[in-house]
Image: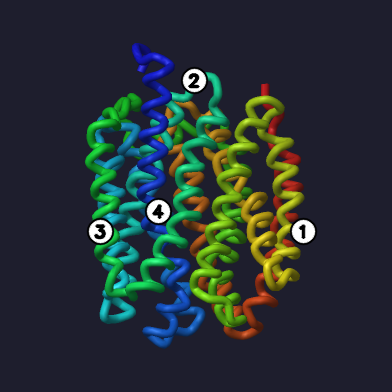
């Protein structure tokens, strides 16, 4: 890495952001299709929540060991093999004959997503140099833009050609992977003197485990609330009579706003620090969610944009902050934020569905909108940056 130029670093970060984009682009197909899956398989909201919940659970289970292996072994298997699994199996989900096979396809795709996230995020930290927060936001933008474009793309495909057309969508992703095979370098590794996974975790996080745990708890709560909104927002507005294209647009605006919010948050964190940016974003999340639930008609799109802007803006900050606290294990630090935090938060998504079966989606989401306020006090106790 030391011999690479600034221009080389930019090209590598662009390629890594493209890995993030193409993997998450296909992963984004599942949520906007939930209303169709509910109709096709006659699902309850709890069963629909299991589709998202299994995906988050696999992120929780798979990403930490993948982060450890990525720091330890110099291989592109995780960086490039993961997106291929996402592209192939999520594309096949549309032609699944049964609900249980659909779960299998989603789970394999989720394993692929869990494979590339910590490895690629760790590489971004290696090649970022001075503008750490901003470059991590660019990388994160690849994923959030994917979750903005993916729902629109798959909604248009299914609206015009039906679920039977989804396998053809994998051709685009596999073509992009040919370019990435040429553009992505072999990642560097860390030396942990054969201490094993637990020994390496102790060496990396031991001196900073308290602030790292605090950041992780903040990210778990953020993940739970954002994934609950993202999972059940399509079902809520489908029940209210919105079309599949309209729902895809809402999801796209939600995630595109997160990409914009992440870029602004990353730039500001490089200038004024992580703590004040986290505080402002989490304070404004609750009112933006209530506006989304209150709006109707064309204003619903404004509410989706504002909510996504604030609730998703802090994703890259959590990853970058922990990588700065524990610079020797960048992939493991990334897996802690994107795997353990995102996965555990997402594991609670079926609980949101169970409560929604009993009390209605609108009521449960109205309650969840208050939860981000719990993190404001936690952010206050984060240590000051040097």
Q: Position of residue 313 (x, y in %)?
A: 62, 45
* Nearer-N-terminus badge (4/3): 4
Quick one: label 1, few (<14), some, or many (20+) residues within 10 Å?
some
Tag in front: 2 or 4? 4
Please indicate, yes or no, whether residue 38 appears anywhere in the rendered image. yes
Q: Position of residue 121 (x, y in %)?
A: 43, 37
Separation of disc 3 and disc 1 at Cα? 39 Å
Q: Is residue 20 left or right of residue 278?
A: left
Q: Is residue 105 above or below residue 363?
A: above
Q: Is residue 259 left or right of residue 20?
A: right
Quick one: label 3, few (<14), some, or many (20+) residues within 10 Å?
many
Residue occupied by mark 4: 25
Dividing the picture into quadrants, the one containing residue 107 is bottom left
Separation of disc 1 and disc 2 at Cα? 36 Å
Quick one: label 2, few (<14), some, or many (20+) residues within 10 Å?
few
Separation of disc 1 and disc 4 at Cα? 29 Å
């Amino acid at each position: 890495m030391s011999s690479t130029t600034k221009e080389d670093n930019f090209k590598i970060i662009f390629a890594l952001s493209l890995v993030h984009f193409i993997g998450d682009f296909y992963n984004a197909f599942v949520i906007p299709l939930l209303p169709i899956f509910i109709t096709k398989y006659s699902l309850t909201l709890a069963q629909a929540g299991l589709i998202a919940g299994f995906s988050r659970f696999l992120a929780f289970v798979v990403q930490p060991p993948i982060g450890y292996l990525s720091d330890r072994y110099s291989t592109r298997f995780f960086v490039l093999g993961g997106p291929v699994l996402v592209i192939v199996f999520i594309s096949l989900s549309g032609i699944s004959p049964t609900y249980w096979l659909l779960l299998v396809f989603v789970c394999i795709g989720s394993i692929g997503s869990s494979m590339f996230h910590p490895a690629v995020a760790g590489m971004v930290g290696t090649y970022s140099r001075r503008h750490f927060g901003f470059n991590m936001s660019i990388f994160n933008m690849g994923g959030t833009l994917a979750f903005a474009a993916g729902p629109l793309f798959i909604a248009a495909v299914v609206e015009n050609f039906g679920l039977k057309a989804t396998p053809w969508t994998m051709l685009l992703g596999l073509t992009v992977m040919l370019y990435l095979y040429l553009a992505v370098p072999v990642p560097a590794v860390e030396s942990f003197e054969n201490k094993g996974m637990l020994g390496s975790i102790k060496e990396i996080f031991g001196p900073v485990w308290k602030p790292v745990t605090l950041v992780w708890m903040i990210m778990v709560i953020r993940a739970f609330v954002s994934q609950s909104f993202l999972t059940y927002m399509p079902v809520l507005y489908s029940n209210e009579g919105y079309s599949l294209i309209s729902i895809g647009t809402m999801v796209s605006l939600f995630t595109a706003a997160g990409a914009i919010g992440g870029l602004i948050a990353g730039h500001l964190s490089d200038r004024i620090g992580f703590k004040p940016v986290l505080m402002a974003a989490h304070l404004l999340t609750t009112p933006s969610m209530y506006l989304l639930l209150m709006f109707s008609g064309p204003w619903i799109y404004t509410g989706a944009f504002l909510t996504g802007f604030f609730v998703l803006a802090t994703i890259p900050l959590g990853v970058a902050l922990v990588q700065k606290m524990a610079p020797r294990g960048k992939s493991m630090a990334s897996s802690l934020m994107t795997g353990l935090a995102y996965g555990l938060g997402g594991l609670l998504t079926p609980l949101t569905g169970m409560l929604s079966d009993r009390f209605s989606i609108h009521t449960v989401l109205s309650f969840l909108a208050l939860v981000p306020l719990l993190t404001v006090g936690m952010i206050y106790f984060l240590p000051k940056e040097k």
